[in-house]
Amino acid sequence: MDINDLNKSQLILLAILLSFITSIATGITTVTLMQQAPESVTVPINRVIKQTVEKIQQVEGKTTLQTVIVKEEDLIVDAIAKNQGAQFTLTKEVKSDGNDQAEVSAGKGFVVSDKNILVADSMFVQGEGNYFATNSSGKFKAQFLLGDKSGFAFLKIGAPVDEKNVLTTSVPPFADVNKMKVGQKVLVLGNNISSFMFDGDKNIKISATLGNAGAMIINLEGEVLGLSLYNEQSSFASIDAIKTALASVSAE
């Protein structure tokens, strides 16, 4: 058959076949020449190939170090956000002058156990009574459990006042006060959030105000250092003291 008689498709197939045969022949010829060539020729070629591979591997495995600047403001925002679900506003039902029931503030409190146990200031949570704990998920009844001589008390969150509400809360991480360093910032999550520098005294002094009663005290990691008390003589209950007392409550 004359090549001029081939159509376009046949010519393309023929070209592909010739290219394939040519590449095989070139490969065989190259390998044969490399085997027959003296070492002075093959060593530089192999060295170039090796160096090229090493350079590619270094680029692929390159580690880039990037410095990230974290502002103190961002740390404060994150620390507060981490503990939103653990904090509650407390109220207590009392009789008014006309023997009607009314609710008064019982300070603040925060969750310290996955059994929905709250810690609060015993100045406002004293003995039996009708207590209520409120957070973003709703208002719930709370039962008095135990008061401690250190100035705090425990409540257990119970049924919702509105059956439609479902309790949503979280237990915050506990800090180690002994690891605090002088100059570290401490946050008080009272009605008005305040802060101060740790001065090295483990018996932290807090401004004893009604707005701070039962407030959570945290570090910039969002870890709980303790509870703020409405007591000029002892305005701080450490998380270590709270954990010790909590163990006896949990055992009951």
Image: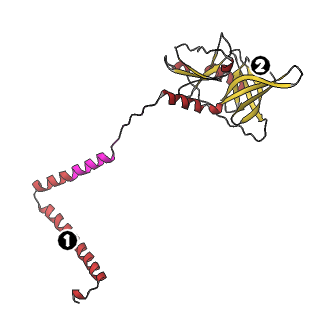
Tell which residue pokes out farthest to the right in this image: 98
Tell which residue pokes out farthest to the top in this image: 233
Please say whether residue 42 is visible from this viewpoint: yes
Q: Is residue 112 toward the left or the right of residue 44 in the image?
A: right
Check the image and report above or below for 20 versus 77. Answer: below
Separation of disc 1 and disc 2 at Cα? 97 Å
Q: Is residue 209 toward the left or the right of residue 81 in the image?
A: right
Label of residue 25 in the image: 1
Percent position (x, y) of residue 237? 64, 17
Please say whether residue 250 is visible from this viewpoint: no
Percent position (x, y) of residue 211? 67, 20
- Write down the quadrant of residue 23 in the picture: bottom left
Q: Which residue is mark 2?
A: 126
**67 is within the stretch colored magenta:** yes
Check the image and report above or below for 80 versus 55. Answer: above
For the record, the magenta segment spans 49-69
> Which part of the image, by quadrant, shows the C terminus?
top right
**245 is within the stretch colored magenta:** no
Indicate the colouring scheme. secondary structure
In terms of secondary structure, where does tag 2 sit?
A: loop
Residue flagged by tag 1: what amino acid is it?
Ala
> Which part of the image, by quadrant, shows the N terminus?
bottom left
Residue closer to the observer: 78 or 64: 78
Mark 2: give few (<14), some (14-19) or many (20+) Cα within 10 Å.
some
Mark 1: give few (<14), some (14-19) or many (20+) Cα within 10 Å.
few
Residue flagged by tag 2: what amino acid is it?
Gln
Percent position (x, y) of residue 102? 82, 25
Number of the front mark, 1 or 2: 2
Label of residue 8 in the image: none
Q: In the rendered structure, which disc, 1 or 2, sits on the residue that comes first in sequence?
A: 1
Residue closer to the observer: 52 or 123: 123
Q: Tell me which residue sits at (29%, 45%) in the image.
A: 58
